[in-house]
Amino acid sequence: MGTGPFAVPTFDAICSAGHEVALVVTKPEPPVKSRKGPPPAPVRQWAVGRELPVFDPENVNDVDAVETLNRQAADLLVVCDYGRILKPEVLESSTLGGINLHGSLLPAYRGAAPVQRALLSGDRETGVSVIHITPRLDAGPVLGQQVTEIRSDETAGELEERLADLGVALTLECIDQLSQWDGQTAIGTAQEAAKVSKAPRLSKSEAAIDWNRTSREIDCHVRGMQPWPVAFAQLAVRPDKPPLRLAILQVSPADCEPTDLSPGQIVDPQEFTVATQDGSLRIDRLRPAGKREMTGQEFVRGHQLSRGTSLS
């Protein structure tokens, strides 16, 4: 059971390991809004390439969907990047219930955006967890975990790809572990309630950069907001025109002299450095609204910026 790209490496490894896949359950395709239509979801595309049967109910928890699952007589549900909470009737459709590969070290970051939230929080490390599924969101006992350091230049998209690969061997190990389980005795390690944190889906409103934060916090924000919704700032280029929206793609610490400028004001127009709460950052890569991606140096060559001009 899955829809997004995070699931594909693990699902492919399960097939390559010789396990029989009775059915691939994925979300239905969204309504067509253009001639080309939406690109196929990664799991659907993978399943078609593998010539595996696909089932895409609107609601996997309704009676008809559960009946379809019951007919498969599956040993185990393997869930990853599916985006649905499974009711007990769904979990009971397989002999051993279900396992879920999740992109965090549970109980940290339960929810839809664990990779992004770890970056936004400034965490130094993260990882993947495989849990035995219960009807509560990401709350089941942990069967296994794998830890990795978060690289200093890594975006959420890059980290998610790396975690997807990291989860492959761990999931296969947990499947082997469950193959020896009697289905009755306790399995896994219960999550500590006191350490639970949430990872709700990102929203566009969160993407605006707050220059009153520290330089590291802003750097984490810029990396955590990629590939979506992308961090942005507004620059008042000319007083007679509305502010220009800049998608900020990469920043780095700037070696500037101490300044009395306020956070968000341009410190060095030639280097495109901006004051923060505790120093300044250089804008290395950006994409002005309606324009191509460019370096900060390319942008300043085409605009007359002044020291003290504010970004908001």
Image (spheres, rainbow, N blue to C red):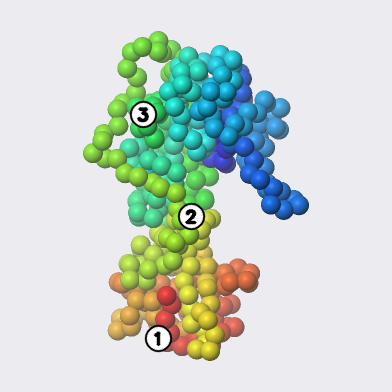
Task: Mark yes or no: residue 295 visible.
Answer: no
Q: Quadrant of the C terminus?
A: bottom left
Residue 311 image point, x, y percent: 43, 77
Estimate how packed mark 2 is, as few (under 14), some (14 to 19) or many (20 or more) residues with alpha carbons within 10 Å: many
First in residue order: circle 1 vs circle 2? 2
Q: Residue lying furthest front in this view? A: 63
Callout 1, which amino acid? Answer: Gly
Instruction: Determine the secondary structure under disc 1.
Output: loop
**Which residue is the site of mark 2?**
155
Of 220 and 151, the residue lying toward us: 220
In 3D space, how far apart are the residues under numbered discs 3 and 1 (Cα atoms)?
A: 52 Å
First in residue order: circle 3 vs circle 1? 3
- Could you tell me which residue is drawn at 57 percent across and 72 percent down? 288
Estimate how packed mark 3 is, as few (under 14), some (14 to 19) or many (20 or more) residues with alpha carbons within 10 Å: many
**Which residue is the site of mark 1?**
308
- Could you tell me which residue is drawn at 26 percent across and 40 percent down? 195
Residue 277 image point, x, y percent: 31, 72
**Which residue is the site of mark 3?**
140
Residue 268 image point, x, y percent: 43, 83
Q: Do the residues bearing badges 2 and 3 touch, measured as CB atoms within 8 Å?
A: no
Q: Is residue 249 above or below residue 243?
A: above
Q: Is residue 260 above or below residue 166?
A: below
Callout 2, which amino acid? Answer: Thr
Q: Is residue 190 above or below residue 39?
A: above
Callout 3, which amino acid? Answer: Gly
Of 297 and 204, the residue lying toward us: 204
